[in-house]
Amino acid sequence: MSRTTRSSCSRSCRSLLGLLLCLTLLLGMSGCGSGGDEAPVLRVGVALYSQDDTFISALVQHLERLAREEEQQRQIQIRLSVMDGGSNQTTQLEQVDRLIGQDCDVLCVNIVDRTAAAVLVDKAEEADIPLIFFNRQPVAEDIARWEQVYYVGARAEESGTLQGQLVLRSWLSDPEVDRNGDGVLQYVMLEGEPGHQDTLLRTAYSVKVLTDAGVSVEKLAGESASWKRGQAMLKVQQWLPELGEDIEVIFSNNDDMALGAIDAYREAGLTLPVVVGVDATEPALESLRNGELYGTVLNDGKGIAQAMMDLILALTDGSDPADAVELVEEHYVWLPYRAVTLANVDSVMDSGT
Ligand code: GAL
Ligand code: CA
């Protein structure tokens, strides 16, 4: 089948599906689809950079739960095909080709390498399948290539700023943080994957809060541990013999790496400095409650999944996406971050985010 034939077929299938979904919604619970008729099927392709990532796998679980809830409410079937890119862009491109071949109605892509976004946008446009990028943000020019492309995520600089504010508060309120009493904040930085927007901006903005507030800082070490707990533990173990007693603050671009740092201190039997992360994953909240992790910043995976589901439904039932989610510059949905410490952990987590 030629590309043109397949893409116009997929277009007409999708508009037919839209019509069926609309009818289901209009008829509500009044028996549409009764008498043994199959509920209309919505096919959603989800391509992940890596399923072996604590935050991403939790986000997908939220998406799966929401799909089940919407199936009940709307009397439709939602088939999520989740693919694990294994941190390899070539693999992910093949997976996206397969999802397009399966005639999915919407594509959700957590892109491995943001510089490959243009190719993906062109593939989606050619097949006329709306494309939602999430968590890993392509550059603005690529998002602007086609009107049916969206990005759902959180602003990286905001998480860096909130993390910096947590550290500033502890520095100003607790003289013990300045272990050597020299008035300078000695820190190390555990970075996520090189080139990721969250790595670059969290690293820069967290420290900027301190320097903007007039705090003198000294960076003792900084390296990428690619978001991973095990890698972070190894890095910190390498730093400890030389820097152990000098480190006053450990900034970590995410919680998994912060927990890796804590593992290294625990194993060495050393007193923990101030350790801060980002994400508010379950194990991080447990560590915070145990008094190990000083603070974290909630990365709202549940909210991201909800916005994605709202967009998916709007894009396939013929309604205006701008009525379903708060769209910024026609393409972006931004979720807010929130700072979490022992003082507010229960209220933040109870508030549903
Ligand atoms: C970040 C998150 C990291 C990691 C990364 C993957 O937003 O804080 O833990 O999941 O996304 O892209
Ligand atoms: Ca000091």
Image (cartoon, rainbow, N blue to C red):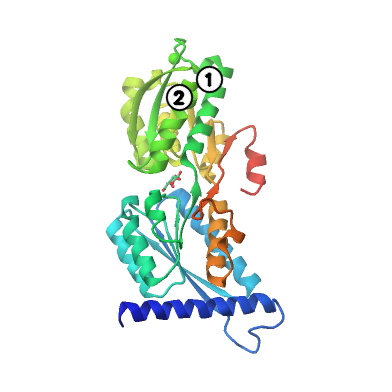
In the displayed structure, 243 sits above or below 319; it is above
Residue 259 occupies which quadrant of the picture?
top left
Question: Horizontal placement of 30 versus 59: left or right?
Answer: right
Q: Position of residue 315 (x, y in %)?
A: 53, 67
Q: Nearer the viewer, residue 197 or 350?
A: 197
Q: Is residue 64 above or below residue 58?
A: below
Rate crowding at label 2 as few (under 14), some (14 to 19) or many (20 or more) other CA atoms within 10 Å: many
At mark 2, the secondary structure is strand
Left or right: 167 in relation to 237 = right
Which residue occupies 57% across, 57% down? 306
Quarter of the image for residue 131 reads bottom left
Specify the label residue 171 is tagged with: 1
How many neighbours does mark 1 have within 10 angstroms: few (below 14), some (14-19), or many (20 or more)?
Answer: many
Q: Are marks 2 and 1 in contact (CB under 8 Å)?
A: yes
Specify the quadrant that holds the N terminus: bottom left
**Which residue is depicted at the point 31% across and 60% down?**
119
Q: Is 93 left, or right, of 216 in this rendering?
A: left
Say which amino acid is labelled 1.
Trp
In the displayed orientation, state which residue is furthest to the bottom: 35
Residue 81: image location, x then y, percent:
44, 68
Q: Residue at x 46, y 40 (%)?
A: 156
Q: Which residue is mark 2?
A: 249
- x and y, in percent, of residue 169 in the image: 57, 23
For residue 50, say whether it is visible: no
